[in-house]
Image: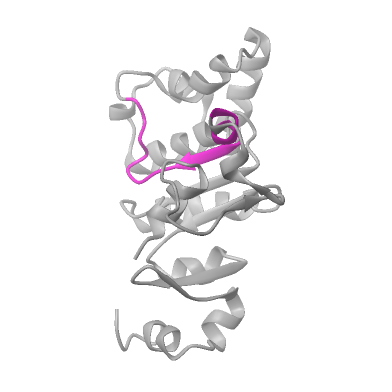
Amino acid sequence: CGKTTLLKMINRLIKPTSGAIYINGENIQTMNEVALRRKIGYVIQQTGLFPHMTVRQNIEIIPKLEKYKPAELEENTKKLMHMVGMDCDEFLDRYPTELSGGQQQRVGVARAFATNPDIILMDEPTSALDPISTLKIEDLMDDLREKYTVIIVTHNMQQAARIADKTAFFLTGEIVEYTDTQTMFNNPKDERTERYITGRFG
């Protein structure tokens, strides 16, 4: 229905065929593409970690491009590992294949925040995780939304109800309804939204 496509339009991986996307009142098509993407963190399905790199190397790849000084790089990496609840001594020198799915996803979140972006895009970040790992990621997202704009794609209605301030319902490429989450789930305005939420289709 276009959820992932929307995320990719926000960081200009896909160009809209019509309309425009604005961040802080500025059309993103007028922005420098590289600069825009470095202000946006992206957590994709299945983590997207580089398998030949350690956890440390995965997290530090963009900060190194941004020419962080060694001491600053070390401090930033430790802060990010603490943020996602992972011990530096235990995990930094491991490779993605040595981690569980939930641990890989948390490293993916840490990498997305490596340069303190303004916006975080999350595409089904818990789709392949067990319920306990999912709740850990959700708790992390709940903490982060106080400081960042987080846009999450999920087909899990319960997850949206738990973590989102506002929710949009997409159907066949159309935004059917967009409102605060409580209204969406308790008093949807569009019949199609109500039918989907109540399980009468979808």
Is 46 on the left-hand or right-hand side of 107? Answer: left
Q: Quadrant of the N terminus?
A: bottom left
Q: Nearer the viewer, residue 126 or 139?
A: 126
On screen, residue 94 above or below 44: above
Where on the picture, by quarter, is residue 102?
Answer: top left
The residue segment tinted magenta is 34-50
**Residue 174's x, y, as percent?**
42, 71
x, y percent for residue 38: 57, 31
Quadrant housing the C terminus: bottom left
- Between 179 and 55, the residue placed more toward the observer is 179
What residue appears at the point 56 percent right and 45 percent down from the top-left corner?
120
Q: Is residue 77 magenta?
A: no
On whether residue 36 falls in the magenta region, the answer is yes
Quarter of the image for residue 170 reads: bottom left
Give the residue furthest to the top: 70
- On screen, 111 above or below 138? above
Where is residue 108 shown, x and y percent of the image?
Answer: 44, 36
Colour option used: one colour
